[in-house]
Amino acid sequence: MTKGRITLLIVTVIAVIGIGGYWFIAIPATSSPNGSVSQSRFTPGPYEVVSESFTAVDESRTTQAYKAFPGLPNRTLDGEIWRPKNRVQPGPLLINSHGFMSFRQEGLYLNRFLASHGYTVVAVDYPLTGIWAPEGPLMTDVINQPGDVSFLIDTILRRNANDADTLYNTIDPEKIAVAGVSLGGLTSILATFHPKLQDPRIAALVSIAGPTSIFTPTFFESRDLPFLMVYGGGDAIVPHEDNALPVLSMYPDVTLVTLADASHAGFAQPASTLMRFNKNPDDVGCRTVTEELGVEVAEQNDKFMTLLGDADDGIDLNQHIEFCTRELIPEAMKASRQHMFTTLAVHAFLDSLFAEDDAARSASWEYLQTTLAQENGSEVSVTQPDQAG
C-alpha cells in the first residue's frame, strides 16, 4: 500500500470516528407517534428558531456559602433563549427549569420545538443545583430558585419593553408559563403555588416528573390556574404513585399525562444521545443519587423541609422527598419516544391556553384530553381528577 493510500485510510478512519462521535453526542435519536393527528402535530412550526446566550445577575439576592465555596453577594444566571424569528405579534413566554445535577439544555428538544411554534423559551444554569455547581449540586438551594424564576420574568419583560432590544414587543405579559423536569418541576410548582414564593404573573404550570409528595391540599389553595403533570409510569427515582397520583385528589385543574414504562432520567436531553442504548436511564440516575450522593441528599432533605415551610404553607412535615424507592423495570420506554410524547403533551397544553384563536385552543385541548391517548394506545394515558379512582 502506498504512503498516499495509508494517509487517506487514516484520514478516513479519523473522519468516521469523528462523525460517529458527533452523532452519538449531539444528534438525538428520533421517534414518530402513531395516528395522523399526532403525526401532524409533531412537526416543527412555521418559525425559524433563533437562539442567544445571556447572563442575568440579580444583585438583590445572595448565593449561599457551602463546603469550601464562600458564597457570592449576588445570584448569577447564565442562560439561553430560544425564540421565533420575525414573529409578527407578541407571543407566550416559557421559563423552563432544569433538574438536579443538570444544565440549561436539558430540555433542548422541547425548547426548540416550542420556539418554532411561536414561543419564547428561557432556560438557565441555576447557581447551586446544577452540574456546574462549585462544590457539587446542593439540593436545598431549590428554595431560592422560585426567586430566580421571578427575576428571569422581570429581566425578559424589561427587554420586551426596550425598543432597542431584540426581544422588543415579542412577549405577551398575560401569557407566561413555567415548566421544569424533576427538581426543575418542583421549582416551577413552588414558583406557582407556594404562598410565600409564588409569582402571580405565572398563568400556566407544567411539571415533568416533579416531586409533590411533601404537599397537602392546602398548598394548592392559593391559586387557580391550569396545571399539567407529565410523568413516567416506570419512574424509579421519584415514583409516579407517590408524586403524580396524589395531586389528582388535591387540585381540581390538573391534567396528568402518564407515559407507560417511561423513566425519570429519560426526560432529559442526554437520554436520547449519550444514553440512547441504556435500557433504563434510571439505572445511572439511581446509582448516582444513592451511591455518590446518598448521605448528602438525605441531610439536605431534612434541611430542605425546614426551609420550605409548615402546615400553614401546605407542607407535610412528616414527609420527605424519597428518591429511588421503586425497583427498576428491566427496560424503559425509549427516551426518543418519551421526548416525543412530552413535546406533544406540553405543546397541546400550552396552545390550549395561549393559541391565537378559539378554534386552535379548542383543537389543542381536544387533542390533549382525547386524541393523544387514543392514537397512541397503551403508551400514553391522560387522567383528570374526576377520572381518578
Image (cartoon, rainbow, N blue to C red):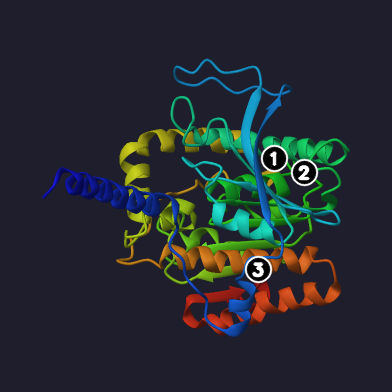
Identity of the residue drawn at 69% across and 24% down:
61
Residue 111 sits in which quadrant? Answer: bottom right
Work out whether residue 188 can be spotted. yes
Determine the residue located farthest toward the left in the rendered image: 1
Task: Determine which residue is flagged by label 3.
Answer: 255
Task: Determine which residue is flagged by label 1.
Answer: 149
What separation in Å lies between label 3 and label 1 (alpha carbons)?
A: 23 Å
Q: Position of residue 28 (x, y in %)?
A: 45, 58
Contact between marks 3 and 1 (CB within 8 A): the answer is no
Identity of the residue drawn at 71% across and 54% down:
220
- Residue flagged by tag 2: what amino acid is it? Asp
Task: Determine which residue is flagged by label 2.
Answer: 199
Q: Position of residue 39 (x, y in %)?
A: 58, 77
- Residue flagged by tag 3: what amino acid is it? Thr
Contact between marks 1 and 2 (CB within 8 A): the answer is yes
What separation in Å lies between label 2 and label 3 (alpha carbons)?
A: 21 Å
106 with respect to 9 (left or right): right
Mark 1 and mark 2 lie on one chain; the one further toward the N terminus is 1
